[in-house]
Image (spheres, rainbow, N blue to C red):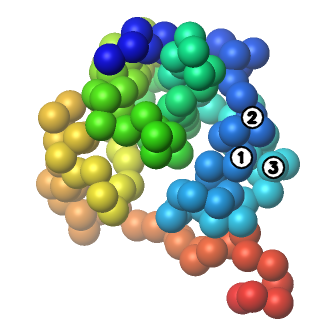
Amino acid sequence: MSALRISTDPQDLDVALIHHFLSTQAYWSPGIGRDVVERAISGSLCFGAYLEAFGQVAFARVITDGATFAYLADVFVLPQHRGQGYSKQLVQAIMAHPQLQGLRRFMLATSDAHGLYAGFGFSAPARPELLMEIVHLNPYAPASAV
């Protein structure tokens, strides 16, 4: 396994790569516009993961007030770099970040990585009856596809 460098420096992010993955490969954001990705990045604490020989290979962002709440979103490892333990390293770096300590609630949504996140203490809501949401299915689809 190559050494993974994890950075929260926004200057290190490969926004074109992030946008391409989120818009074409992520099940949660098909067709998302680059402008939306750029706004999401600018309003979040972002984590890029890099390999010296490849550049950016993984990404995650955390929406947080830095005091009481955080939401982990847009976590991915490029397909050709999966199975190397990079997702665990990335989530470990996120959980250890100084701005994300002492929070009352840290949330995420996933359809396929429950085992990864359970290893870091995430679980199904203890009282789901307290939670509410507004969901817009495929908000990034062209108007003709809706």
Instruction: Residue at 43% x, 34% y: name it.
Output: 81
Question: What type is the residue that disc 2 sits on?
Answer: Val
How many marks the image carries: the answer is: 3
Marks 2 and 3 in Cβ contact (< 8 Å)? yes
Residue 140's place in the image compared with 142, above or below, is above
Q: Distance between the residues labelled 2 and 1?
A: 6 Å
Quarter of the image where one finds residue 41: top right
Marks 3 and 1 in Cβ contact (< 8 Å)? yes
- The quarter of the rendered structure image containing the C terminus is bottom right
The crowd level at tag 3 (other Cα within 10 Å; few <14, some 14-19, many 20+) is some
Q: Name the residue under label 3.
A: 34
Q: Name the residue under label 1.
A: 19
Determine whether, in the image, residue 101 is placed left or right of residue 63: left
Determine whether, in the image, residue 141 is placed left or right of residue 60: right
The crowd level at tag 2 (other Cα within 10 Å; few <14, some 14-19, many 20+) is some
Instruction: Residue at 71% x, 65% y: name it.
Output: 31
Q: How far apart are marks 3 and 1 (CA)?
A: 6 Å
Q: Report the disc number at residue 15.
A: 2
Residue 31's place in the image compared with 42, above or below, is below
Marks 2 and 1 in Cβ contact (< 8 Å)? yes
* Position of residue 11 measured from the top left corner of the image (x, y, whole percent): 75, 15
Instruction: Residue at 30% x, 58% y: name it.
Output: 112
Question: What type is the residue that disc 1 sits on?
Answer: His
Residue 126's place in the image compared with 74, above or below, is below
Q: Which element type, helix, strand or loop, lies under badge 2?
A: helix
Question: What type is the residue that disc 3 sits on?
Answer: Arg
The crowd level at tag 1 (other Cα within 10 Å; few <14, some 14-19, many 20+) is many
Q: Which element type, helix, strand or loop, lies under badge 3?
A: helix
Q: Which element type, helix, strand or loop, lies under badge 1?
A: helix
* Position of residue 40 measured from the top left corner of the image (x, y, whole percent): 69, 42
